Structures are given as C-alpha cells and as structure tokens.
Amino acid sequence: SLRGDILAAQRQPKRAIESYQKALQLSPESTHLNYVIGNCYFSMNDFRLALVYYDQIQPPPPEIDYNRALALAYLGRHLESVSILKNVVTEGVRNPYFHYLLIEQLIRIKQYEEALFFTELAQSTIGSTQTLSILKATIYHKQQIWLRAYSGYTEANNILRLNMAEHLHPYALSAWQIGQLEEATELLEKTLRIDPYSSAAYEDIVRLLIER
C-alpha cells in the first residue's frame, strides 16, 4: 500500500495501519504487509500486536526474527527471545545487533557462562568491537571476576573513550576491587560528572575516599 508507506514515513502509524489493513484483506499472506503492520505496532510500543503480525510470516527472514526477539525482550519474555536469537546466530549471521541482543538477554537472565560463549562466538564471527568488550566486562563484573572485568572495560575504553555512567561505574568498581584506588576515584568522579544524581556512585566514592 503506497498510501500506507507514505503515512508510515510521516510517522502516522495508526493511519498507516488502517491503509495496510485494507490491502491485507486482499492479500492476507503478504510478507510485506504483515511486516510493515508489525513495525507500525512496534513503533507504538504495542509489542503484543506487533508479534501477532510478525508471527504470520513463515519462515521468517532474519530481520523479522530480530524484531520478534526484540519485541519479546520488551515484553519480558527473555527465554523466548533468546531461543530465536540462538537459532539465527548459530547459522552464522554477521549482523552485530543479533549478537548484542542475544548476549544482553543472557546477562539479564543471569546465564553468564552461556553469555561468555556467545561473546566469543560473536568475536569470531564479526570481530572485536567496543560493544563486545563492554558486554564481556559486564559478564565478569556480574560474576565478580574483577581483574577480567577491569581488563574488559579497559579494552573497551581503549577502543573509544567510555562516556556513559552505566559503564564507568562498574569500571570504577572493578578498578577498586583490584587495588587501583586512584583510577577508581577518577572513574567515579567522571561518573558523577555525567550523572550527578547517581546516589550509588556518590556512596561508593565516599566509601572509597574513606578507604584511601
């Protein structure tokens, strides 16, 4: 539906859906129409209805599997999301976002060893990236394997300077745990400059300064 495409491009998803639905009545098995209707619902954060349309497409190509997995993740259905992503990733897909989403979901459900396995698989498939270094560091941080966590954050920082509080804070804690107190203090100060309302970072820097 050309009209639907125009409305979707104009960020009018509700009106686009109405147009697409009329075209879908004439071609109910259309991959394109089910996909774009699903995308419109996704853009409105109606992930359940998005899945209804994505699931009409069988077998789904990788880009639809990604949207399905992401919608399931937003709905908190992490195991289903992981199952889809594992199937795609093990087939050798090179798009890094499939790998990132899978590893993030495995971290969320605390499957750390499996997350490490898929991090290594991603590195062998797409090469080293800052995001993979951060994900690896996050896994080790969650496991309290401090030296490896610190090494991972340092690797990520060397690729491109870290500037997000959610990365700098665990980097600081990892540095602290291996005795790099001066660096940990600097990282916590940088965390607070970026996010001055972080009570956890503030409490940690107070504790660290007392310890020093």
Image: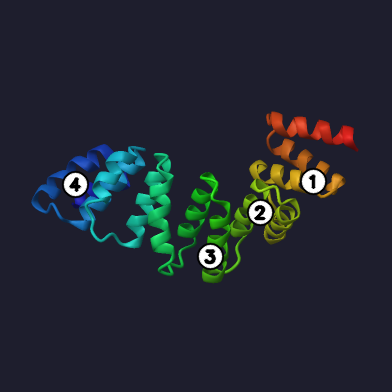
Do the residues under discs 4 and 1 have CB atoms within 8 angstroms?
no
| Nearer mark to the viewer, of 2 and 4 | 2
Do the residues under discs 2 and 4 have CB atoms within 8 angstroms?
no
Q: Quadrant of the C terminus?
A: top right
Q: Which disc is residue 122 wearing?
A: 3
Do the residues under discs 1 and 3 have CB atoms within 8 angstroms?
no
Q: Which residue is mark 1?
A: 177
Residues packed near mark 2 inside 10 Å, few (<14), some (14 to 19) or many (20 plus): many
Do the residues under discs 4 and 3 have CB atoms within 8 angstroms?
no
Residues packed near mark 3 inside 10 Å, few (<14), some (14 to 19) or many (20 plus): many
Alpha-carbon span between mark 1 and mark 3: 28 Å
Alpha-carbon span between mark 4 and mark 3: 37 Å
Residue type pointed to by label 3: Ala
Q: Which residue is mark 4?
A: 20
| Nearer mark to the viewer, of 4 and 3 | 3
Q: Which residue is mark 2?
A: 137
The quadrant in which residue 10 appears is top left
Residue type pointed to by label 2: Ala
First of labels 1, 3 by sequence position:
3
For residue 112, above or below residue 43:
below
For residue 13, above or below residue 159:
above
